Amino acid sequence: MPRRTCAFQDRFFNLLLESFGLGQVHFLTEEDVKIAESTWISEEDEQETEPARFAVNEDNDRVLATPLPTMKVVKSNKTPEEQARVSRRKVWRYVAAACILPIAFYSVWIPMKTDVLESGIISIQDFNPFHNSAPGTYESQEVELPDAIEKNSTSLETQISELDNSVDAYTFAYVPGVNIPVILDRTTEEVPIQEVSAPELQAQTFSATRMEYVVGCFGLEENARNLVAKLKSEGFDAHIVDIQNGLHRVSAGAAISEEAFAKIISRADAGGYSGWILK
C-alpha cells in the first residue's frame, strides 16, 4: 500500500496564542489591497499606528515589546489654492486679534486707571500699565483782606466837572484797583433865550464900583451850576453873574475895594483858575 502524507493544522499553536489573549492572524488578499487603496480619504484626520511588535526572550517566548512612537498623518482632499486661502484666513484672524486686544485693554485701562477724564490731557505714560501716576497735591494759602475798602472821596460829578469839554471818555476810580469807564455826553442843546423881567434883573444888578472875577462861561446852566458848587467847596463866594448871548457867566467872587479883589484873584490863580474882570 503506497504511503500518503497529510498535513494537519497545529491546534496547540492556536491555543497558545489564545492563551495570551491574541487572535488569529489573517492575511489580506490582492483584491482587499486594491479596494483599500481606491477608498476616498475623507477630510477627517487619520492616525496611522504601527502593529504591535514582539521580542523573543531566552526561552523562545514572544513578549510584547514597547510600541514605537506613532506618526500622525493628515490627508486632505483640498486643492493647493483652497489650502492657501484657508491659511490666509488664519493669518488675518491672528492680525485682527492682535489689533483688537490692545484696543479693548486700553479702552478699559485709561478711563479707570488714569485721570484723563478729569484733566482732559493724555500723555504717553497713560499707556504704560506699570506706571503709577502720583495724585495731585494742593496747599491752602491764606490771603489777608482789608477790613474796609476806602472809596474815592471825590464824587463822579465833581471829577467830570473838572474835565475839559473836549474829553468824551473818562475812567472813574471807584475803589483802589477798580476803575469804571464813563462815556460823557457832550451834546449841546439850543436853549431859547428867555426874557427876564425887570425885577429879576434888578436883583442881580451891581453898582459901578462892584467888580466880578469871571472864571467861566457855559451854554448849559447845569455846567455853570456844577462849577459854582465846586468853587464854593473850595471856599470861594461863587455865583452866576448873568446870561449874555446864551452864556452863563460864573464869578469866583466880587469885591468893591481893589485890595479885596486882588485877594480873590490870587486865590483863583493858586487854584488853577484864570478869568477876567467884569465891572
Image: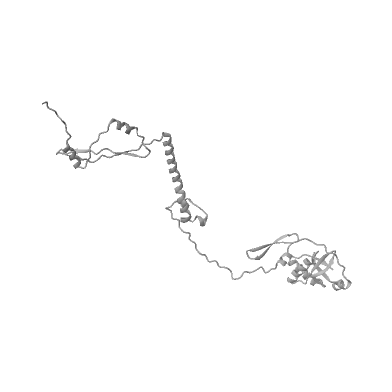
User: Picture quarter containing residue 216?
Assistant: bottom right
Q: Position of residue 212 (x, y in %)?
A: 82, 69
Q: Position of residue 101 (x, y in %)?
A: 44, 48
Q: Is residue 79 above or below residue 218?
A: above
Q: Nearer the viewer, residue 278 or 89?
A: 89
Q: Nearer the viewer, residue 99 or 260?
A: 99
Q: Position of residue 24 (x, y in %)?
A: 22, 38
Instruction: Give the colour scheme shown.
Output: one colour
Q: Position of residue 176 (x, y in %)?
A: 63, 65
Q: Is residue 153 left or right of residue 4?
A: right
Q: Write the residue at 72% across / 64% down.
A: 160
Q: Which of the image's four quarters has the N terminus?
A: top left
Q: Write the residue at 44% across / 43% down.
A: 93
Q: Write the residue at 44% across / 45% down.
A: 97
Q: Residue furthest right?
A: 198
Q: Is residue 173 left or right of residue 63?
A: right
Q: Write the residue at 45% across / 44% down.
A: 96
| Tag count | 0
Q: Nearer the viewer, residue 66 or 138?
A: 66
Q: Which of the image's four quarters has the C terminus?
A: bottom right
User: Picture quarter containing residue 2?
Assistant: top left
